[in-house]
Image (cartoon, grey):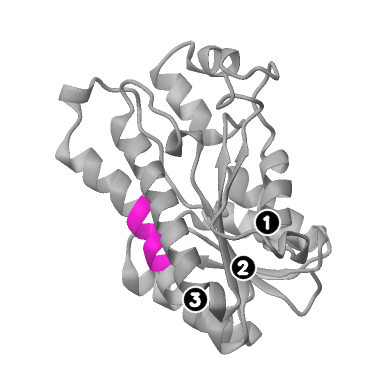
Amino acid sequence: MNDQKVAIVTGGSSGIGKATAIALAKQGVTTAIAARRVKEGEETVRLVKEAGGNGLFVKTDVANEADVRSLVEYTVKTYGRLDYAFNNAGIEEIMTPFLDQTTEKFDQIMNINVKGVWLSMKYEIPEMIRTGGGAIVNNSSVAGIMGFPQMAIYIASKHAVLGLTKSAALEYAKSGIRINAIAPGGVETEMADRVNENTPQWLETLTSMHPIGRIADPEEIANAVVWLLSEKASFVLGHTLIVDGGVVSR
């Protein structure tokens, strides 16, 4: 990775996205940070520059096709190319009994977590083809591999991300684009805090599921994303990298 390379990170205003943008900056990668929250997104840009990188913020709702198209077009217009993408934007589901889950919540979660990843790849891939290849990582979850009661819609959305990842990886392998997914376990993020607010003891329960005895720092997931994007992972394609402190093995 070097300063000629350009990345897009969606959901870059907090958590894993923010940590990944900073980790890429330390590798000399220029990063376009996309998110809905302007103040927080601009703070990520400040931290990226502090880490020695360069970048910009683009206000983006990944469920909106025009927004995603604009994000990719503006990034390429500004920096001339697109080499990497971390399609990370997603929302959680507050634990709700299956029969009480609503159509509105289903549509909201699927639009951001699944359609958002699909739209991002739809506009990122042509730009990578134009410059001879690239690498994409989509953020799934251990929720993409296992089930969990009272979170069926979120679980389904993260399973869907893996289906999109594998299918796109096969289709664009010969175009020089490596597409993979990351499946984090519990991570110390605002998202985890929000679930905990609505479901007391959630973080305690979540932590107890991890054989390692704790949940992850966002930086630990970011390091895995940076590796998957890098040439060190040059033969890794269509893969789901589980970074979960042992949850799935249990």
Q: Amino acid at mark 2?
A: Ala
Q: Residues within 10 Å of mark 2 (few under 14, many from 20)?
A: many
Q: Quadrant of residue 167?
A: bottom left
Q: Quadrant of residue 150?
A: top left
Residue where numbered disc 1 is placed: 228
Viewer-proximal residue among 170 and 17:
170
Quick check: marks 1 and 2 in contact, CB under 8 Å? yes
Q: Is residue 133 above or below residue 13?
A: below
Residue where numbered disc 3 is placed: 125
Quick check: marks 1 and 3 in contact, CB under 8 Å? no
Rendered image: mark on residue 135: 2
**Where does the N terminus fall, quadrant-wise?**
bottom right
Whole-angstrom CA distance, mark 1 to mark 3, is 17 Å
- Residue plotted at (59% across, 24% down): 249
Whole-angstrom CA distance, mark 3 to mark 2, is 9 Å
Q: Is residue 175 above or below residue 21?
A: below
Whole-angstrom CA distance, mark 1 to mark 2, is 8 Å
Rendered image: mark on residue 37: none
Q: Is residue 178 left or right of residue 65?
A: right
The answer to which of marks 3 and 2 sits earlier in the sequence is 3
Task: Report if residue 37 is visible in the image.
Answer: yes
- Residue plotted at (55% across, 78% down): 174
